[in-house]
Image: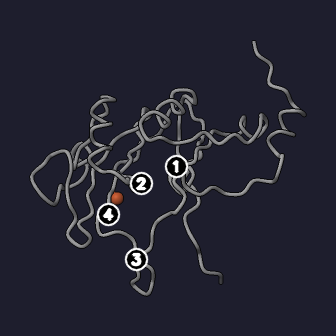
Amino acid sequence: MSKISMIHHINIQISDRQRTREWYERVLGAQFLDRGPKLNQRQLQFRIGTGEIHTSDTPEVIEVPRVHFAIEVEDWDGMLSHLDSEGVSYSRSAGGSFTPTGGEDPHQGRREDTNEHYSYINDPDGNLIELVYHPLGLESSEGADVGLVTDADNVRWTQQAGFVEDAYKAEPVKST
Ligand SMILES: [Fe+2]
């Protein structure tokens, strides 16, 4: 078998593309991935950190308790004040789903092994997202410090040159 290099994307259920797009861009700084009109129609995709979030349209999202994904935050205090200013609530127990550990603050906790900071938020469809921050950083298999990314805007998967431009030429988006 081959070594697995990374998790490429997660796929979440959503009920309103526009609302989801606005929320992920505004709250988490996700970037809409433009694949051209045909592929955009298939699903909504974002780049978030070094990974991607893809979506499945569903009229009624099925919420499964405690199922979540976690994203690493670069500036922990900055993110919490951003959530405050956006009116997004966050909690250490994900609203009572988890037994809170690490400290007394109901809004955030610390984990023992890495001193990982953590908290939970929900997107507009109720998808549970864990925010984490690792002050000790990331290390290689040899124990050497590794910068997560050297690119200030984060890396991206290389797209075929001209793919999106050609897709828009082939299928111009009609404004109504
Ligand atoms: Fe988790």
User: For the N terminus, which image quadrant?
Assistant: bottom right
Tell me where residue 43 sits by quadrant. Answer: top right
Q: Where is residue 41 in the image (x, y as percent from the top left)?
A: 72, 34
Residue type marked 3: Asp
Mark 2 burial class by Cα count in 10 Å: few <14, some 14-19, many 20+: some
Is 25 placed above or below 69 here? above
Task: Give the foreground label among 3 and 1.
Answer: 3
Please name the residue that numbered disc 2 is placed on: 71
Is 4 placed above or below 11 here? below
Of the image marks 3 and 2, the number of the one nearer the N terminus: 2
* Element type at mark 2: strand
Disc 2/disc 1 C-alpha distance (Å): 8 Å
Please name the residue that numbered disc 4 is placed on: 134
Horizontal side, residue 44 vs residue 72: left or right: right
For ligand 1, the image quadrant comes to bottom left
Outermost residue to the right: 170
Disc 4/disc 1 C-alpha distance (Å): 17 Å
Disc 4/disc 2 C-alpha distance (Å): 11 Å
Q: Do the residues labelled 2 and 1 touch (CB within 8 Å)?
A: yes
Of the image marks 4 and 2, the number of the one nearer the N terminus: 2
Task: Name the foreground residue: 97 vs 77.
Answer: 77
